[in-house]
Amino acid sequence: MNNIICHKVIAVTKKGAELESDGKKIYIDFDCCAKNFSLEKGKVCKCVATRDAAKLAFTFYTCPQTTLIFKRSFLKDLIAGKSATRKFLDMQKAIVEAGYTSYDLS
């Protein structure tokens, strides 16, 4: 399975998330992710990704799967005003607010 690693969240809406990887924009459609997860697991649900709090990462059920990693960097976090952990929690909250879930691996 081929994974795309992203490090930046551009925007999150009720329909999905826009990420950036190597200067390219990637759109994550939550509805498509939920369908892919349901097909893989054999049950209908609203799960769009797995999340790992220890690694501060989400792996979305896109084709191929897309992994979003929040890297810890004291200086960048200080400048941005948000820690990597806060960004991870904000993404989890945005997924829930959009009416979807993520499966906890940690």
Image (cartoon, rainbow, N blue to C red):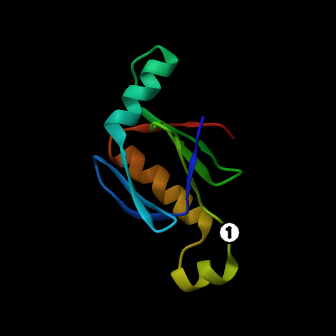
Identify the residue shown where x is 28% and y is 49%.
14
Please tell me which residue lies in front, 99 or 35.
35
Specify the quadrant that holds the C terminus. Answer: top right
Q: Where is residue 56 in the image (x, y as percent from the top left)?
A: 64, 55
Identify the residue shown where x is 46% and y is 68%.
23
Q: Is residue 74 above or below residue 96?
A: below
Relative to residue 57, is residue 46 drawn left or right? left
Identify the residue shown where x is 40% and y is 35%.
33
Specify the quadrant that holds the N terminus. Answer: top right
Identify the residue shown where x is 48% and y is 50%.
92
Q: In this view, does 25 lie above or below 32?
A: below
Q: In this view, does 78 lie above or below 93?
A: below
Residue 46 appears in the figure: no
Instruction: Please name the residue that numbered disc 1 is placed on.
Output: 72
Q: Position of residue 51 (x, y in %)?
A: 58, 43
Residue 106 appears in the figure: yes
